Image: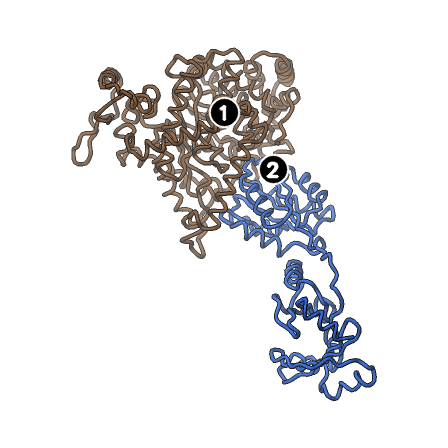
Chain colours: A brown, B blue
């Protein structure tokens, strides 16, 4: 085998970077160590050959192993995006403003379970759950309160919402209109990844087929009207939380991604119209080097898939842009302050892996929702990594490490063999319907539990180095009266809104759902007239039916 | 054989996190229990109905959404309302310590928080499920012997041998119990006369308290350890929690008389050969 010298390509890359820097300068004039050793944006091997170019390459270029931006965090740091939300829209709005004042750069909304499953707060199914794991949103009115005083043209908002993602996005668009921000200026993300709900997270409503239609309707609508919006965040996070390995996280996420791409192509969308708006969501877990390698492998795999298999031409379609959250299931209820250290290592791995945004968990999340103090420490953890550690001074600093490159190759190889198996089963939707991924994850979760109980896997403070008589930390309590208050708000809303227009828009939605029209415009009209999430999802339930787990 | 403990693992409310529930369900299966899992999003009414329908001994509730204070007590209330208050209810998930007393006051027997080994949960369930569901299916083989406390063996024996015509099979001193025993054959069973060897002997104490007379009834059983395990799981008070060696190479254990209205029962397990030989001697 002959190797080709590709040094010329490196010069070209450098030249392009310089042109870019002339237009948008980096965070600092110069990056240097404490000893005044100057730090370059990128370090490369002495011999740049075609093998290097094929597998590793330069950041900001295919196959993106080293990152999606040419100078990564030297240009702009990742978005520090802490997932927050609890209780009422009003309380959550206060927490959002607090986090923005503290230097957070994007919002991430946690919704309560009734909202996530499309029930109003007064639905009997919502008993006990209103405002518990996130904010309760019943109608546009709550969304207006939630986003009050937050400039939607400046702040990007990520919403962890899946089955009713269209409804919440519709509300966001209408709030934007009312603030005078047109839809094309809105930026943010909806999670909108229904497949992993069936696999690992559980907040599904409808069966797979109509769910996939809702998703491709969003793709099509946003490509046209909300171009800066990430229409989906294809999530390995919850798959990992449910117990998978890093390889399974990569494999199942990409398998789901393929399913969404296929669905959109079948719906007649052009690959380069929707693919640039796809984004991903990974877990930041414990094994430091494996985690770093995981991000690198996933970027390379996605780029190759999009370019080679789907023939995407737009480089933005090739880019695996990823949000990361540190692994919630790695937190211990015992000695909760130790979790700060776990989170630091996990966050550092995500940063060295080249994440685009990051949520760091709070130390007390194995016990309850985080207190304000805990949430602040979690944000400070990111800020310390960003501003003090120096790991942001050069791009992909671990590239070329024999170990990290080996792990990257191994993860890719093992994930590809899973993908092959899933293809043989007929793709991710068929594999989910057969319960395949669910079983693989459960097997792994049980194995992990056995190892922890036997002491083979050590969890500091939990199965070793325990403390007797641990002090109990202060925990956040959600107002127990909230369920009642939210019901009262809902009653008042129903009394004052124009009932006739609500019914009219809901009926139009019903007819559209029975046909083939894109549902987004209909849903926007429903929420604009203050139809509740339960009413909108109720109409869709009556047309689509509900999913029952296998 | 002993019936297996049946457990319903349930996810009340809208919470979709079932890693813990699934892991516990499988661990309890591996511990020999029969486990039914409800799947996600069950209302308390659905869970109570399933528990009764499936005739379970225990319901394990898992919730990570913070709705436990509303949902767990409601399951207990509905079970009681439908007369199923003998079903043990336990819970787990992300549950702050300070909520546990409230849940216990409302009928949740125990709460297992993150980091609890599954074996702890299994042991708790075994120790606390109610006996109704756990009938021991097999009767003892026979009455091995009836123990009668006497002050003086030599004085008591002639009545049994000469007046009743029982065959004296032998006498034996059991140092550990400070008792001298005479064995008298009667059909497939025996009468044992027990004479205290010192004032510390349990027999001496019995005679002091209640006078001479019937002291205990012993059953010949196949597996003492298994029966002790079963009795213990059902909360039956025991004098011996593990078998100990008795006369004739038997493994024996006593059940506390307060379990049986003042009657003391002994369980004896004989090694196959010696039991056969002894029965042969009776002829």
**Closest to the observer: A109 or A39?**
A39
Mark 1 crowd level (few <14, some 14–19, many ≥20, 10 Å Cα)? many
Give me the residue at 40% from left, 49% from top. Answer: A460
Question: Which chain's residue wears label 1?
Answer: A
Does A118 sit above or below residue A456?
A: above
Task: Please indicate whether residue A477 sits to the left or right of residue A510 in the image.
Answer: left
Tell me the quarter of the picture where residue B213 sits.
Answer: bottom right
Return the residue found at the far left: A36
Element marked by disc 2: loop
Q: State the residue position of label 1.
A: A256
Return the residue found at the far bottom: B155
Does A504 sit above or below residue B237?
A: above
Element marked by disc 1: helix
Tell me the tag on residue A170.
none
Q: State the residue position of label 2.
A: B13
Give me the residue at 45% from left, 32% from top. Answer: A249
Question: Which chain's residue wears label 2?
Answer: B
Where residue A94 sits in the image (x, y, percent)?
44, 32
Give me the residue at 61% from left, 66% from top. Answer: B241
**Quadrant, the N terminus of chain A:** top left
**Closest to the observer: A409 or B274?**
B274
Task: Please indicate whether residue B224 sits to the left or right of residue A212 in the image.
Answer: right
**Residues tagged 1 and 2 counted as in contact (Cβ below 8 A):** no
Does B176 sit above or below residue A546?
A: below
**Quadrant, the C terminus of chain A:** top right
Tell me the quarter of the picture where residue A541 sits.
Answer: top right
Q: Is residue A91 visible?
A: no
Does A480 sit above or below residue B163?
A: above
Mark 2 crowd level (few <14, some 14–19, many ≥20, 10 Å Cα)? many
């Amino acid at each position: 085998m002959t190797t080709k010298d590709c040094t010329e390509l490196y010069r070209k890359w450098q030249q392009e970077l310089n042109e870019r820097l002339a237009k948008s300068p980096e965070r600092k004039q110069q990056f240097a160590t404490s000893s005044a050793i100057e730090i370059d944006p990128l370090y490369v091997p002495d011999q740049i050959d075609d093998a290097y170019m094929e597998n590793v390459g330069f950041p900001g270029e295919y196959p993106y192993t080293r990152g999606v931006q040419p100078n990564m965090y030297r240009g702009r740091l990742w978005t520090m995006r802490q997932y927050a939300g609890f209780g009422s829209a009003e309380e959550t709005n206060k927490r959002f403003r607090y986090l923005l004042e503290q230097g957070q750069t994007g919002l991430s909304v946690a919704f309560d379970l009734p909202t996530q499953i499309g029930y109003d707060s007064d639905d009997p199914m919502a008993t006990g759950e209103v405002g518990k794991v996130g904010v309760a949103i019943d109608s546009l009115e709550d969304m207006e309160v939630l986003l009050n005083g937050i400039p939607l043209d400046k702040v990007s908002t990520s919403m962890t919402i899946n089955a009713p993602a269209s409804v919440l996005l519709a509300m966001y668009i209408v709030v934007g209109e009312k603030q005078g921000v047109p839809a094309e200026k809105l930026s943010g993300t909806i999670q909108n990844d229904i497949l992993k709900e069936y696999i690992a997270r559980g907040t599904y409503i409808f069966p797979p087929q109509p769910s996939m239609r809702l998703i491709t309707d969003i793709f099509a609508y946003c490509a046209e009207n909300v171009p800066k919006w990430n229409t989906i965040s294809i999530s390995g996070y919850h798959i990992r939380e449910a117990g998978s390995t890093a390889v399974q996280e990569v494999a199942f996420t990409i398998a789901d991604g393929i399913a969404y791409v296929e669905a959109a192509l079948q719906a007649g969308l052009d690959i380069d119209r929707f693919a640039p708006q796809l984004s991903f969501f990974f877990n930041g877990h414990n094994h430091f080097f494996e985690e770093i390698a995981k991000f690198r492998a996933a970027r390379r795999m996605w780029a190759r898939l999009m370019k080679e298999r789907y023939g995407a031409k737009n480089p933005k379609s090739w880019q695996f842009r990823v949000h990361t959250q540190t692994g919630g299931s790695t937190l211990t209820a015992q000695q909760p302050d130790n979790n700060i250290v776990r989170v630091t290592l996990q966050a550092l791995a995500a940063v060295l892996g080249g994440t685009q945004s990051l949520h760091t968990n709070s130390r007390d999340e194995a016990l309850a929702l985080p207190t304000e103090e805990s949430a602040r420490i979690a944000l400070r953890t990111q800020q310390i990594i960003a501003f003090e550690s120096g790991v942001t001074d050069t791009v992909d600093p671990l590239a070329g490490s024999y170990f990290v490159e080996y792990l990257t190759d191994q993860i890719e190889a093992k994930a590809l063999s899973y993908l092959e198996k899933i293809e043989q089963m007929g793709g991710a939707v068929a594999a989910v319907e057969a319960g395949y991924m669910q079983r693989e994850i459960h097997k792994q979760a049980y194995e992990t539990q056995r190892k922890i109980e036997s002491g083979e896997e050590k969890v500091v403070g939990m199965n070793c180095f325990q403390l007797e008589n641990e002090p109990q930390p202060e925990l956040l309590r959600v107002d127990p009266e909230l369920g009642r208050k939210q019901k009262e708000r809902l009653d008042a809303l129903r009394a004052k809104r124009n009932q006739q227009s609500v019914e009219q828009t809901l009926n139009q939605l019903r007819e559209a759902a029975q046909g083939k029209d894109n549902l987004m415009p209909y849903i926007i009209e429903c929420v604009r007239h203050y139809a509740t999430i339960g009413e909108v999802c109720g109409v869709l339930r009556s047309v689509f039916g509900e999913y029952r787990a296998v | 054989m002993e019936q297996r403990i049946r457990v319903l693992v349930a996810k009340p409310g809208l919470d979709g996190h079932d890693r813990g529930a699934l892991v516990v369900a499988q661990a309890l299966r591996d511990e020999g229990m029969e486990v039914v899992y409800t799947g996600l999003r069950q209302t308390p009414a659905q869970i109570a109905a399933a528990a009764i329908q499936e005739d379970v001994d225990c319901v394990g509730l898992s919730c990570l959404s913070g709705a436990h204070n509303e949902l767990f007590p409601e399951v207990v209330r509905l079970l009681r309302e439908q007369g199923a208050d003998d079903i043990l209810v336990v819970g787990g998930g992300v549950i702050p310590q300070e909520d546990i007393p409230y849940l216990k006051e409302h009928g949740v027997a125990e709460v297992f928080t993150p980091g609890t080994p599954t074996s702890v949960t299994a042991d708790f369930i075994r120790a606390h499920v109610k006996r109704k569901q756990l009938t021991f299916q097999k009767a003892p083989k026979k009455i091995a012997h009836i123990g009668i406390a006497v002050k003086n063996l030599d004085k008591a024996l002639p009545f049994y041998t000469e007046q009743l015509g029982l065959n004296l099979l032998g006498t034996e001193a059991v140092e550990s119990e400070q008792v001298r025993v005479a064995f008298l054959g009667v059909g497939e069973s025996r009468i044992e006369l027990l004479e205290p060897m010192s004032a510390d002997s349990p027999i001496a104490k019995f005679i002091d308290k209640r006078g001479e007379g019937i002291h205990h009834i012993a059953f010949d059983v196949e597996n003492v350890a298994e029966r002790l395990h079963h009795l213990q799981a059902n909360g039956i008070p025991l004098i011996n929690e593990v078998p100990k060696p008795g006369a004739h190479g038997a493994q024996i254990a006593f059940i506390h008389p307060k379990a049986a209205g003042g009657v003391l029962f002994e369980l004896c397990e004989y090694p196959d050969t010696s039991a056969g030989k002894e029965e042969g001697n009776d002829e």
